[in-house]
């Protein structure tokens, strides 16, 4: 079925959607059966638009039910919690309908992109695994891409990945996506890409801290220690970001005594926050060290951090909380 752009609302709009759906689900199923679903596009889109205009929606065959209804955040990870709340409010799947908060994967298509048709099974993919980040950098190639406009090739590549893996697993396992003019050496079939993802999925789920060195925009040294395997898609409701800052003084590198004191105290803070917030990592640079955490809105992590700062007042630390639905703080931290 085609994918339709939606136009914003929130939880009230989600409740209104499911109230409307209860009265119209049978009509939508009948419209699919008699191929008149096009007459219902505007009505469905209005209800989805009220939730958030950045969403898209899709009707299709179900895996265990006759039909499926999927919302799509259209690659905007900041909208994925909204579609999850939509799913949490959904009725139980039944013989006729099942529901998805993102495009499900598992089935390739004959793509119709404008006037062009492409068999997704003909894609071949160059794959490079980054095991520290638990991601695959991919270079999809299709023999039918020759002569097609760039935007058509790009659209088909991302639709192929969505259809094969599903939107959530594209977000979870796919890193950089490049376009190929010729088939990459050692390219794999779609099933080969699925095997590569399965290999990553089988890796231990433990944290994967990496050490990154660079410079800030003033040319000063920056050292980042970060959990590179931490993924936004796996912590959908952790949209509160906290920076805990400590002054280091003018010396660079900082004195061993100062670092030893900080490191020991940080371990104590991390232990206190173990069930309250997720630790992403820290940034050390001349004059300052900053720890980064994310937490759910209802967490008591802010109170725990403030209590810890009062108990460790000699460190002169401070905390700042912001809402960061897309975890944009990671952009400057090698994430």
Image (spheres, rainbow, N blue to C red):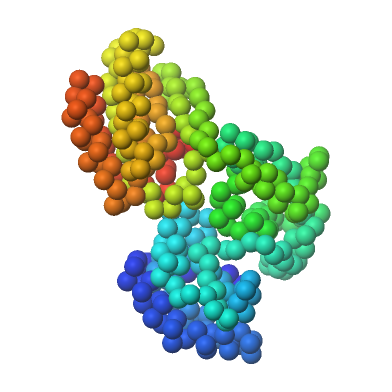
Is 189 located above or below residue 5 in the figure? Answer: above
Front residue of this view, candidates 28 and 155: 28
Residue drawn at x 49%, y 50% as measured from the top left: 233
Residue drawn at x 45%, y 67% as measured from the top left: 87
Is 302 located above or below residue 110 in the figure? Answer: above
Asked if residue 181 can be seen in this view, the reply is: no
- In the rendered view, does 96 fall on the left or right side of 50? right
Q: Quadrant of residue 39?
A: bottom right
Quadrant showing the N terminus: bottom right
Residue drawn at x 57%, y 63% as measured from the top left: 103
**Residue 99: image x %, image y %?**
52, 71
**Residue 192: image x %, image y %?**
76, 49
Is 106 located above or below residue 64 in the figure? Answer: above
Front residue of this view, candidates 263 and 80: 263
Is 126 located above or below residue 101 in the figure? Answer: above
Q: Quadrant of residue 111?
A: bottom right
**Badge count:** 0
Asked if residue 280 can be seen in this view, the reply is: yes
- In the rendered view, does 231 fall on the left or right side of 312? right
**Residue 149: image x %, image y %?**
70, 56
Q: Quadrant of residue 314?
A: top left
Front residue of this view, candidates 295 and 251: 295
Residue drawn at x 54%, y 79% as measured from the top left: 94
Front residue of this view, candidates 304 and 240: 304
**Residue 235: image x %, image y %?**
44, 49
């Amino acid at each position: 079925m085609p994918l339709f752009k939606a136009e914003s609302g929130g939880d009230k709009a989600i409740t209104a959607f499911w109230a409307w759906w209860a009265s119209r689900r049978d009509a939508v199923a009948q419209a699919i059966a008699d191929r008149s679903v096009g007459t219902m596009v505007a009505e469905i889109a209005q209800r989805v638009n009220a939730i958030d205009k950045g969403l898209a929606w899709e009707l299709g065959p179900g895996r265990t039910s006759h039909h499926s209804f999927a919302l799509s955040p259209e690659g905007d990870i900041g909208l994925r919690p909204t579609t999850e709340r939509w799913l949490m409010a959904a009725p139980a799947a039944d013989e006729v309908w099942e529901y998805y908060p993102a495009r499900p994967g598992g089935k390739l298509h004959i793509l119709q992109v404008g006037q062009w048709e492409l068999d997704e099974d003909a894609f071949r993919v160059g794959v490079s695994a980054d095991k520290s980040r638990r991601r695959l950098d991919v270079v999809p190639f299709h023999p039918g891409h020759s002569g097609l406009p760039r935007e058509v090739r790009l659209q088909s590549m991302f639709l192929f990945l969505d259809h094969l893996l599903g939107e959530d697993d594209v977000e979870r396992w796919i890193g950089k996506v490049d376009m190929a003019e010729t088939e990459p050496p050692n390219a794999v079939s779609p099933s080969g890409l699925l095997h590569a993802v399965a290999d990553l999925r089988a890796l231990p789920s433990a944290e994967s801290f990496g050490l990154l060195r660079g410079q800030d925009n003033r040319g000063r040294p920056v050292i980042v220690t970060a959990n590179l395997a931490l993924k936004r898609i796996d912590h959908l409701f952790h949209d509160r970001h906290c920076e805990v800052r400590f002054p280091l003084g003018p010396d660079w590198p900082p004195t061993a005594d100062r670092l030893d004191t900080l490191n020991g105290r940080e371990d104590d803070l991390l232990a206190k926050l173990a069930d309250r917030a997720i630790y992403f990592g820290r940034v050390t640079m001349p004059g300052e060290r900053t720890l980064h955490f994310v937490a759910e809105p209802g967490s008591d992590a802010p109170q725990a951090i403030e209590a810890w700062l009062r108990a460790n007042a000699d460190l002169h630390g401070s905390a700042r909380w912001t809402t960061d639905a897309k975890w944009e703080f990671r952009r400057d931290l090698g994430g």
